[in-house]
Amino acid sequence: MSAFIEVDNLTFDYIKQDGTSLQAVSGISFRVERGSFTAIIGQNGSGKSTLAKNINALLVPTSGRVLVDGLDTADPASLWEVRRRVAMVFQNPDNQIVSSIVEDDIAFGPENLGVDPAEIRQRVRFALQDVEMEEYRKKAPHLLSGGQKQRIAIAGAVAMQPECIVFDEPTAMLDPRGRSEVLKVIERLHDKGITTILITHFMEEAARADHVIVMNDGRLEMDGTPREIFSQHQRLKELSLDVPAPVYLAQLLRERGIDLPQIDTEDELVRCLCQLQ
C-alpha cells in the first residue's frame, strides 16, 4: 500500500484571546497507508481532534506539513480537493445535520459540489444502503435515535465520495446499541476500500484497526499495530489509558497458568478458549 496521508513534523498552535499561543500538537510525524484503518487514542486534551482537523484542512499547520494524496493542506489552491478526498464525521450528530428530511441532508454535500441532480439521487440511494437506513429516507432526523442520526451523518460523508473518512469520536455520545451500529458501518466502509481514521477513547474499537497511534500532551507517544500497542500494559497505564477488556482478561488468564497467545479482540479470545477444551 502507498501512503495516502503524510504528516511531517506537524505542530499546531491555537492563539488565545490575550494573544498568547497554546501548542496543541507538537512535532508529530506518521503515515496513513491508502485503504488502511488507523485508530488514534489518547486522553482528553491530548491533541487528537486538532490532529484530525489538520488532516482535512479545517486547520492548517503552524509548522511542518500535511500531505493528502500528495496535496499540501496549507496550499489554498488545494483546499477543496483535500476536503473532497477527506471527509469528517464528528462526535455529536445533531451538530452535523442541516436538513429536516434525511435524504435532503445527505444530498447537501454533493449539491454544494455542483454534482448533477441525477447523480446526487444515485449517491443518496447508495449512501443510505451503506449505512442501512434506506427505510428512513423521508423521515425527519430529529425523530431518529442517536445511533441512527450518526449513521445519517456518515451517509452524508459517504455521498461526497471521499477516499478517506476521519471519524472524530463518533460513538462517544451513543448507547451500546448505537455504538455497535455505527462501528459496523465504519468497518463496512473500510472493507469497501475507504481509508479510515478513527479517533476513539474506546480501546475495544481501537483494537479493530490495522494501526494505532497513541497521543499524549500533543505528542505522538506510541505507534504500531494493535498487538504491539496493547501488549505494553504498563506504558499505557502510565498514559492513563486502559487496554481492551479481552486483552486484559487474556493477561489475567495467562498469569493463572492458562496458555494463551497475545489477544487483540473478543472474537480471538473466544476462539482461543474454545480450542483449549
Image (cartoon, grey):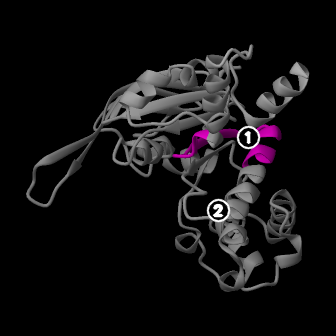
Picture mark count: 2
Q: Quadrant of the C terminus?
A: top right
State the CA–CA distance, disc 2 to disc 1. Answer: 20 Å
The residue depicted at 39 percent of the width and 25 percent of the height is 221
Residue 4 visible, this angle: no
Label 2 vs label 1, nearer the camera: 1
Where does residue 152 sit, x and y in percent of width and height?
A: 71, 68
Where does residue 250 sit, x and y in percent of width and height?
A: 67, 26
- Quadrant in which residue 196 is drawn: top right
The residue depicted at 81 percent of the width and 39 percent of the height is 191
Mark with earlier residue (2, 1): 2
Query: Which residue position is annotated with label 1?
Result: 194
The residue depicted at 45 percent of the width and 47 percent of the height is 57
Up/down of 61 relative to 251, above or below: below
Q: Amino acid at mark 1?
A: Ile
Q: Which residues are magenta?
A: 186-203
Query: Outermost residue toward the front?
Result: 256
Tell which of 208 and 80 is nearer to you.
Answer: 208
Secondary-structure class at tag 1: loop
Q: Amino acid at mark 2?
A: Leu
- Quadrant in which residue 117 is drawn: bottom right
In the shown orientation, is residue 267 left or right of residue 265?
right
Q: Is residue 64 magenta?
A: no
Tell which of 262 and 67 is nearer to you.
Answer: 262
Q: Quadrant of the N terminus?
A: top right
Where does residue 135 sit, x and y in percent of width and height?
A: 89, 76
Query: Which residue position is annotated with label 2?
Result: 113
Up/down of 74 relative to 249, above or below: below
Asked whether the beta carbons under mark 2 and mark 1 sit within 8 Å of each other, the answer is no
Secondary-structure class at tag 2: loop
